Image (spheres, helix red, strand yellow):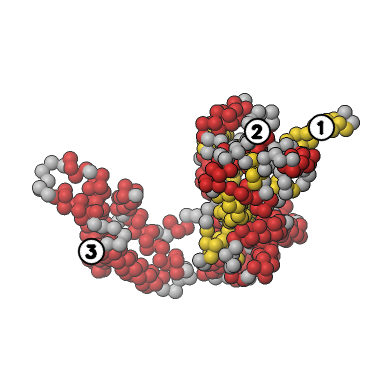
């Protein structure tokens, strides 16, 4: 370590330039970090969803769910499979190992489902992974002022959704609720009986109103492409003109050609219509139209439930961002799009129900403020003890340097700025200055002893290098296991452990490289000759004989005996009460013979009634606090009387009598420590 410190002192300009570059890079990385509420965690769960129109649960399970399970059976890394078959829908949940690559697993499932054979009414299986980034960052509500929810739904799907999806960082926009125009057909039983038609014949005619059938294939450069013809009805009026049969009960298929009048697009068999007209002119049975036996009208129908905003019908929009996008930036860009929507449908008709960006900003700003307050308090405490502005500023350099170094690594490692990483930085704020304080104080001692600042920095740093290294590595070893506990919880604490560990390691590097350079530049040598080096045993050599009975009797005669007696009695009472409470909680009093009847129950009731908010607890805390304050005040007064004109600081004058008392009453100190350990 001495070589490193010596090299840094010999190349001060290089060290200062590297520090400036590190601070600048860390500040730039901080502005580039994505702001999130929680870390982006990919859960090892992938769902396979398959819609099956019109199929019951049994059919869905037999023809869709089981084939999907058989198809993915050979995919490696699967820990478990759960499936649900419901009316018209199949969901298969595949669980992988916690350390599995979800993107690779999703690709393997997609490949396994390529050649699967499903019923014609089944849709394409949708494979989707689960991660914290797939939760909506914005939940919007669009209200229909004129109560025409179907038009609003059409506007939202055609205009709003497409505009939001064009925003950089938006992955998808899901429409929740809403309504659409549907055609309602109410059959008249009397008219059906009059025309000699059955309900089944009308349903069959309606089922054939939409044509979707293959008509052949086209060969291009040796490749054949299938071609299908599609035709749909143009609306309610066209549906009213749909032939559903002939008078007398003939099926609709008996109409020559079986054409669908009023169909949009190409006609399937236009020659058939002419044949039907010729047959009708020749006296053939007259076709019965749907409008002759039923009432046909357009109505609004809810898509997936009914919602209201401020008492008005509405629909919801869920905005999901891409995994690597910044929540705050994406939400701000979506808000710009919503401003245009508000101009179109009204300011009050667009309501932001939930905005995670607001939560992220509040959490980030709150933790940043807490961190800044902690940093300021740490600097003030350093100044209070060092009582030197230059020394305080030298030590304070380690704070931003260490924190920004940790943020720089977070940016390189694609971590985000979330409440977990910020909590780690807040924890590290009070610790990153410790190594710098130790180096500075030791170097400052050599400077005040008459050494040149550069020599003092070298000796002061090398003396404590091994101590601060072991201390920092020990503290780092406490946080690293948080990332190794296993389970999904460890995924959330990886950013915290990494952030704290990196900040502490950065503080160690700063303490042995930058701090010595700053000490040699900013600290001034005290005028005078070099004084003798102090040893670590000076303080102990001045202490009197702690076990001297003569000294104790002298102190008793000087008036301190009564105070010691009172303090001893109070200590004994508190220790006895604590021991009794611990024994009661542990059930040890039940095994003690000879106790009066009801004593154990009384003790249990008394102990259970003592809580953080109970009067007894508050009274004990108040008494102990007052005694501690009085004892501290007495120690200060005694230290001031004894020191007289000595140059020791206030902390030394307060601590020395406490240390003397502890060394004289070793058994009492050990008993107090044992009681505290047992109580804890």
587 to the left or right of 292: left
Calculate the distance from the C-alpha at mark 3 to the C-alpha at mark 2.
Answer: 93 Å
Residue 202 drawn above or below residue 155: above
- In the picture of the structure, the residue carrying the numbered disc 2 is 120
Q: Nearer the viewer, mark 1 or mark 3?
A: 1
* First along the sequence among labels 1 and 3: 1
Give the image location of residue 564, x and y in percent.
25, 63
Q: Residue at x 58, y 43 (%)?
A: 195
Q: Calculate the distance from the C-alpha at mark 1 to the C-alpha at mark 3.
A: 106 Å
Residue at the spot 30% in from the left edge and 62% down from the top edge: 613
Residue 603, position in %: x, y?
A: 18, 52
| First along the sequence among labels 2 and 1 | 2
User: Residue beneath label 3, please?
Assistant: 566
Are the residues at dot 2 and dot 1 in contact (C-beta closer than 8 Å)? no
The answer to whether residue 519 is above or below residue 294 is: below
Q: Which mark is residue 217?
A: 1
Q: What element carries label 3?
A: helix
Residue toward you, 249 or 56: 249
């Amino acid at each position: 370590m001495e070589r490193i410190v010596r090299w840094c002192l010999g190349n001060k300009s290089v060290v200062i330039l590297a520090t400036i570059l590190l601070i600048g890079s860390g500040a730039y990385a901080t502005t580039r970090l994505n702001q999130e509420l929680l870390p982006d965690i990919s859960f090892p769960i992938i769902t396979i969803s398959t819609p099956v129109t019109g199929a019951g649960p049994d059919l869905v399970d037999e023809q869709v769910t089981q084939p999907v399970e058989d198809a993915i059976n050979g995919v490696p890394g699967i820990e478990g499979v759960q499936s649900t078959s419901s009316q018209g829908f199949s969901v298969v949940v595949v669980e992988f190992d916690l350390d599995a690559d979800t993107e690779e697993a999703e690709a393997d499932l997609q490949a396994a489902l390529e050649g699967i054979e499903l019923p014609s009414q089944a849709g394409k299986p949708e494979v989707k992974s689960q991660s914290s980034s797939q939760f909506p960052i914005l939940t919007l509500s669009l209200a229909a002022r004129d109560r025409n929810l179907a038009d609003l739904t059409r506007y939202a799907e055609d205009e709003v959704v497409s505009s939001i999806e064009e925003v950089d960082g938006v992955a998808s926009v899901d429409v929740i609720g809403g309504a659409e125009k549907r055609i309602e057909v109410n059959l008249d039983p009397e008219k059906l009986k009059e025309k000699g038609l059955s309900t089944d014949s009308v349903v069959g005619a309606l089922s054939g109103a939409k044509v979707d059938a293959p008509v052949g294939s086209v060969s291009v450069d040796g490749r054949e492409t299938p071609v299908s013809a599609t035709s749909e009805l143009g609306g309610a009026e066209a549906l009213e003109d749909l032939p559903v049969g002939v008078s007398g009960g003939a099926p609709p298929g008996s109409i020559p050609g079986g054409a669908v009048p009023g169909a949009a697009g190409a006609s399937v068999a236009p020659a058939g219509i002419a044949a039907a007209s010729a047959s009708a002119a020749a006296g053939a049975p007259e076709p019965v139209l749907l409008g002759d036996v039923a009432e046909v009208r357009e109505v609004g129908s809810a898509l997936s439930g009914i919602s209201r905003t401020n008492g008005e019908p509405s629909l919801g929009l869920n905005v999901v961002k891409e995994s690597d996008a910044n929540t705050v930036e994406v939400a701000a860009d979506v808000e710009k799009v919503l401003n245009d929507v508000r101009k179109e449908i009204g300011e009050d008709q667009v309501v932001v129900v939930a905005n995670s960006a607001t939560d992220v900003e509040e959490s980030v700003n709150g933790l940043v403020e807490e961190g800044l307050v902690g940093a300021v308090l740490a600097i003030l405490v350093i100044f209070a003890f060092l009582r030197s502005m230059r020394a305080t500023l030298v030590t304070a350099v380690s704070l931003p340097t260490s924190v920004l170094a940790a943020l720089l690594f977070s940016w390189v490692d694609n971590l985000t700025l979330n409440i977990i990483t910020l909590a780690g930085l807040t924890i590290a704020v009070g610790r990153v200055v410790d190594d710098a304080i130790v180096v500075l104080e030791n170097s400052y001692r050599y400077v005040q002893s008459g050494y040149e600042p550069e020599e003092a920095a070298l000796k002061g740093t090398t003396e404590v290098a091994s101590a601060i290294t072991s201390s920092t590595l020990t503290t780092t070893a406490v946080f690293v296991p948080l990332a190794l506990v296993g389970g999904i919880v460890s995924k959330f604490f990886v950013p915290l452990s990494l952030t704290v560990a990196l900040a502490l390691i950065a503080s160690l590097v700063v303490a042995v490289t930058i701090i010595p350079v700053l000490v040699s530049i900013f600290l001034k040598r005290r005028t005078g000759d070099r004084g003798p080096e102090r040893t670590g045993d000076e303080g102990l050599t001045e202490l009197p004989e702690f076990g001297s009975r003569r000294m104790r009797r002298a102190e008793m005669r000087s008036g301190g005996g009564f105070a010691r007696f009172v303090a001893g009695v109070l200590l004994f009472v508190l220790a006895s009460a604590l021991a009794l409470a611990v024994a009661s909680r542990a059930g040890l009093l039940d095994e003690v013979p000879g106790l009066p009847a009801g004593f154990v129950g009384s003790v249990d009731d008394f102990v259970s009634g003592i809580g953080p908010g109970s009067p007894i607890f508050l009274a004990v805390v108040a008494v102990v606090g007052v005694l501690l304050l009085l004892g501290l005040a007495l120690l200060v007064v005694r230290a001031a009387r004894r020191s007289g004109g000595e140059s020791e600081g206030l902390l030394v004058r307060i601590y020395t009598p406490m240390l003397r008392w502890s060394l004289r009453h070793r058994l009492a100190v050990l008993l107090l420590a044992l009681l505290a350990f047992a109580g804890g």
